[in-house]
């Protein structure tokens, strides 16, 4: 078991809606406030997507990211900021011709997917290694696109967090390390609960852990009703933990989560009740070899 465990809070995501939970933050102010409240509850890292404030739909606009990050940096310079690069990877074949993209397609260039990363230079940016069925569409992270995004992160001094949805993703990560695209001992997330990806059960977690790059620092997390059971399982398996309204909308059976902070409080209690110690943002910065503050980035 890990002697010091950190909590990541994924406050919004791409897919959760206010119809599922009316407490979902969607405006830049709401997202920043949710991140800061999660930090007060014990999260060392906040994982951030942004939304169009009018439509509440996922957005890739730089101005929204800049607004959220500026608010967090002013209020809590120690809090570790993790920005997504997931949007821009989805493809929906149209009904009449699979070569013609359908209306849900967001697939775009690697450069556009990391434009906010190179402009803002957060502490961490996610690097998705999956190509898989996702809902009614396909998520595509072609090798050359992944390499370009990794190179852009490296040039900006941003630590990639490798998002691993299935066993092939881990093999891809190991190959990218061997070829020098990624540094050894990476930061990783084992994502469990996405249909056709890793199943959120202990056996899957142990299997994935055994495939991880040598020296990896990793978090395991589940989605939906398995979010909190996988907090316990990830801690017991030696990993860190993640919760938030991106991954689940309920705090317990039949009880909608009132906030991201409430989810962090529950995750912290689970880890501490099992004998764990929750690491602060400053401690995690030292662990990940990040600058002492994000205020000057």
Image (tube, helix red, strand yellow):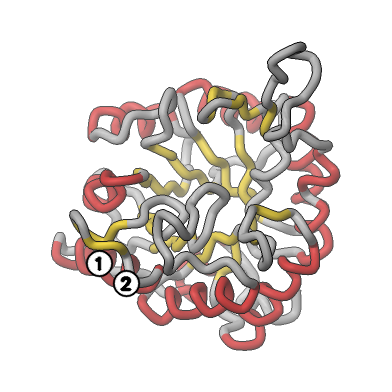
Residue at image point 85% right, 43% down: 111
Q: Quadrant of residue 142?
A: top right
69 horizontally vs 35: left or right: right
1 and 2 marks in contact (CB < 8 Å): yes
Q: Quadrant of residue 251?
A: bottom left
Q: Compared with residue 163, is residue 250 higher up or lower down, i.e. above or below?
A: below
Residue of label 2: 262
Residue at image point 33% right, 71% down: 258
User: Is residue 234 visible to the viewer in this orientation of the structure?
Assistant: no
Identify the secondary structure beneath mark 2: helix
The percent position of residue 11, horizontal first and vertical second, equals 49, 63
Q: Which mark is residue 266?
A: 1
27 horizontally vs 196: left or right: right
Q: Name the residue at the bottom extreme.
A: 75
Label tally? 2
The percent position of residue 187, horizontal first and vertical second, equals 53, 48
């Amino acid at each position: 078991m890990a002697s010091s465990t950190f909590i990541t809070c994924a406050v919004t995501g791409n897919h959760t809606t206010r119809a599922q939970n009316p407490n979902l933050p969607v405006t830049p102010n709401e997202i920043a406030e949710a991140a800061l409240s999660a930090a007060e509850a014990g999260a060392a890292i906040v994982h951030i997507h942004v939304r169009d404030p009018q439509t509440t739909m996922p957005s890739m606009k730089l101005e929204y990211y800049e607004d959220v990050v500026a608010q967090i940096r002013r209020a809590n310079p120690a809090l570790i900021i993790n920005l997504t690069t997931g949007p821009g990877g989805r493809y929906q074949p149209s009904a009449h011709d699979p070569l013609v993209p359908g209306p849900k397609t967001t697939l775009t260039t690697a450069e556009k997917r990391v434009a906010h990363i190179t402009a803002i230079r957060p502490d961490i940016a996610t690097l998705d290694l999956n190509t898989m069925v996702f809902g009614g569409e396909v998520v595509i992270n072609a090798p050359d696109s992944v390499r370009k995004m990794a190179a852009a992160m490296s040039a900006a001094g941003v630590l990639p967090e490798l998002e691993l949805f299935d066993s092939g993703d881990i093999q891809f990560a190991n190959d990218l390390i061997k070829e020098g695209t990624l540094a050894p001992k990476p930061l990783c997330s084992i994502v469990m609960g996405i249909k056709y990806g890793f199943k959120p059960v202990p056996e899957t977690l142990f299997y994935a852990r055994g495939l991880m790059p040598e020296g990896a620092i990793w978090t395991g997390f589940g989605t939906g009703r398995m979010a909190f059971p996988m907090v316990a399982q990830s801690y017991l398996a030696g990993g860190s933990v993640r919760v938030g309204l991106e991954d689940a909308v309920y705090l317990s059976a039949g009880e909608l989560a009132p906030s991201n902070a409430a989810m962090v409080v529950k995750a912290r209690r689970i880890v501490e009740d099992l004998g764990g110690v929750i690491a602060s943002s400053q401690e995690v910065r030292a662990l990940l070899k990040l600058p002492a503050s994000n205020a000057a980035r």
